[in-house]
Amino acid sequence: MATKDILVVDDEMGIRELLSEILFDEGYRIHLAENATQARSFREQHVPDLVLLDIWMPDTDGLTLLKEWVARDQLTMPVIMMSGHGTIETAMEAMRIGASDFLEKPIALQKLLASVEKAIHHGVPVIGTHKQERAPEAADSDGRTQMSLPLDLPLREAREHFDSLYFNYQMQKENGNISRIAEKAGIERTHLYRKLKQLGIKPIKRGSGDLQ
């Protein structure tokens, strides 16, 4: 089997080096870019077998770059988005645009390798090649696809992944109002606080006069 080329795009040197070492040890040929400008330049000259693309970068964010590749018909390779501040909205937007998968940082080793292998095997998602010209029923089918992202994981990891996306989404939607989030989730506030701490989600700071 020919060696597969992977482009890693992340503004954090430590992340680039870590992913590079892990994937190199797995037999992949690795190329690095520290921002969208370098990633654009690489894509103009080469077509990698896969791109690992960070969302939050200083010059151009990953979602914008992904949209550019779609608009220029350059999304001819699968792209896995990465973020340390992932929400279900972000994951759904990335998948809607044409990403193959979405990984939350810190990325577990087995989850990374499984996602990489799956993306390379399946290639570019169909939804990414149709840009925005999809019928409403197709878009609805994409939501169901996006919501099924955790289903390829072991049950415990899938549950934790979904919980993280769910509570991050509710935290943003309710502007950090713990009472409303607890009511919507159907759990007690004390349990909710423990759950948020377990997931590493910090409650949004509110003014001293605001009620939680």
Image (spheres, rainbow, N blue to C red):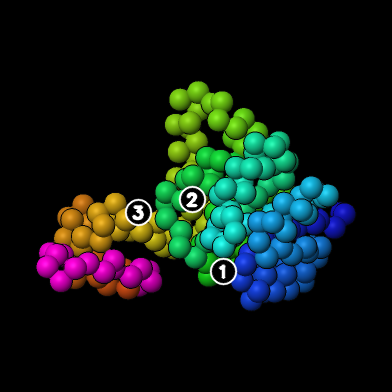
Per the image, the residue denoted by label 3 is 169
Residue type marked 1: Ala
Marking on residue 88: none
**Residue at left 70%, top 74%?**
17
The spot of residue 203 in percent (x, y) is 29, 68
What's the residue at 62%, 67% (across, down)? 11
- Residue at image position (65%, 50%) is 79
Main SS class of the magenta portion in the image: loop
Q: Which residues are magenta?
A: 198-212
Name which quarter of the figure residue 140 lies in.
Answer: top left
Q: Residue tagged by mark 2?
A: 91
Report the side of 191 relative to 131 (left or right): left
Of callouts 2 and 1, the N-terminal one: 2
Task: Look at the image and tell me whether residue 78 can be seen.
Answer: yes
Structural distance between the alpha carbons of marks 2 and 1: 17 Å
Secondary structure under badge 2?
A: helix
The type of residue carrying mark 2 is: Ala
Mark-to-mark CA distance, 1 and 3: 22 Å
User: Is residue 13 covered in magenta?
Assistant: no
Q: SS class of the residue under badge 1?
A: loop
Residue marked by disc 1: 108
**Nearer-N-terminus badge (2/3):** 2
Judge from the rendering whether residue 16 lies leftward or rightward of residue 26; answer left or right. Answer: left
Under mark 3, the amino acid is Tyr
211 sits left or right of 61 in the view: left
Q: In the rendered view, would you say 36 is above or below 190?
A: above
Gap in angstroms between the C-alphas marked 2 and 3: 11 Å
